[in-house]
Image: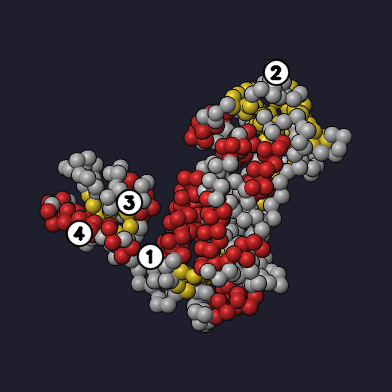
Amino acid sequence: MAHVITQSCCSDAACVSVCPVNCIHPTPEERGFGSSDILHIDPVACIDCGACADACPVDAIYPADRLGERDKVFIEVNAAFYRDNPDISSGWSDIVYPVIPRLPDGLRVAVVGTGPSGGYAVRTLIGRTDADVTVIDRLPTPGGLVRAGVAPDHPGTKGVLRTFDLLYRDRRVHLLGGVEIGDGPSAVTPAELADHFDAVFYAVGAPDSRALGVPGEDLPGSTAATDLVAWYNAYPGAEGPPIPEDGVGRAVIVGTGNVALDVARILVSSPDALAATDIADRALALLERQDIREVVLLGRRGQADAAYTAAEFRALQELPGVDVIVADNPDGLGLDGPPVPERRRIVLLFHSAVEQISAGDRGQVRAVSVTTGDLTHDITTDVVVRSIGYRGVRLDGLPFDDARGVIPNADGRVINETGEAIPGVYALGWAARGAIGGIGANKAHAIATVEAFIDDAAAGRLPRTAHGPDDFRTLVQNRSPNLVRYRGVRSIDRAERARGQAVGRPRIKFTEVSDMLAVARRRR
């Protein structure tokens, strides 16, 4: 079924550049571009890969069989363009159409993880194969780092979850939340997954944090950005930092990546601004009480080598009522005492390395010893957040590269200790590549890995399972006490939105799995 461009098309031609068969016209080089109300997809040439829909910035492109009644007219509008402009296809004779291999019938695959990597893998599997896809997550709420990692004040980025939610409604997709993968009394082992599916994709992310390796790092008030982000994004079980209400009103963040900037922005934002987001209630309450007025970010190298993107830095500079100061020297910044109460500010101090974290009278973090250039100085603080990178964690039953913190793989194919590919086992995104790049990079890796799977399936390199399609669902029904299917996931989503709507917020997330399960199992 071909894709169709609808009325909300903005004609920016992002779809044209990603179409592998050049079936979207008029292009920027052709007559009619700019004067045509919308662009058009050739229903004959379209191979239904979905690349154009992914690239569309205004969600104007849909499969023809998923259009609502009002938009079905655009099926004819798209087709009529090519009947009325027969010459528009001139020069297409040199197009090389991709070879679509013949795959075995009845393929059944599992995708472990529902973040961007897992979501785009499912999207590609549904678009490129006839496989039956089982999607697994340890929580009853899918989304991975989109739900639990994207900053509350960046709601646009979370819009990708709407795309994934459409996939979970597909008749070939089976979403199973609350299923633990690993080695435990209620867990499903990787060996059992391999036994029940023809292929398994692990998109389990990189949930651990790297350590500073300095004295005092384990003091109360010293925390990892991974934990802090999970806490304010309502991840179940995440604990907030013990920030004293009578502290100096300053936080120190070690690192200058986008996550570090996210944390800084959240810590100094006004409670009123945060109250309009989906930030966890527990975080909003604490941030209202403790009143952090200043955040100092420490960068080991210079500003030119900072890991943040230009867009994130610009967003930081646009914070109302917050001064952003960039410095290579602490002189005159007053970092050894309390910040000025009348103004909030973010200080980026470069060429700086942490030497030690010290405690105050109550045993909590009170100061950080820092070397900036040739100068060693102290910064008084209530909390220290290390944001120096994520790394993967070992999943019992799978190979793991401890040095790199990834599942070892070659082109997405998981490899064993001797470097040989394990048939039918794949790794995606950060779990395979390390914590580098954002949603776009993980999307590209997911697509490439699914293409590797397609090559393996066509070449007969997959170990076909002897189990029937219902065997795994029976296994998890008996093994996983917190099992939640798609209907339960939707119930949780509706409940969170209703909780938020009652107080003028987009949603109020549940922070306890027990509360999620109670809603998921409630009969409507």
Whether residue 479 sits left or right of residue 121 in the image: it is right
Is residue 445 visible in the rendered image? The answer is: no
> What residue did someone put label 1 on?
128
Mark 2 or mark 4: whose residue is earlier in sequence: 4
Judged by depth in the image, the label closer to the viewer, 1 or 4, is 4
Under tag 3, what secondary structure? loop
User: Residue at the location (36% across, 51% down)?
Assistant: 59
Q: Are marks 1 and 4 in contact (CB under 8 Å)?
A: no
Q: Position of residue 357 (x, y in %)?
A: 79, 35
- Which dot marks residue 331? 2
Q: Viewer-proximal residue, 398 or 207?
A: 207
Mark 1 or mark 3: whose residue is earlier in sequence: 3
The amino acid type of the residue labelled 1 equals: Arg
Judged by depth in the image, the label closer to the viewer, 3 or 2, is 3
> What residue did someone put label 4 on?
76
- Which quarter of the figure has residue 375? top right
Mark 2 or mark 1: whose residue is earlier in sequence: 1
Crowdedness of circle 1 by 10 Å Cα count: few (<14), some, many (20+)? some
The amino acid type of the residue labelled 3 equals: Ala
Q: Are marks 1 and 3 in contact (CB under 8 Å)?
A: no
Judged by depth in the image, the label closer to the viewer, 2 or 4, is 4
Under tag 1, what secondary structure? helix
The amino acid type of the residue labelled 2 equals: Asp
The amino acid type of the residue labelled 4 equals: Glu
Separation (CA) of disc 3 from disc 2: 53 Å
User: Residue at the location (55% across, 76% down)?
Assistant: 473
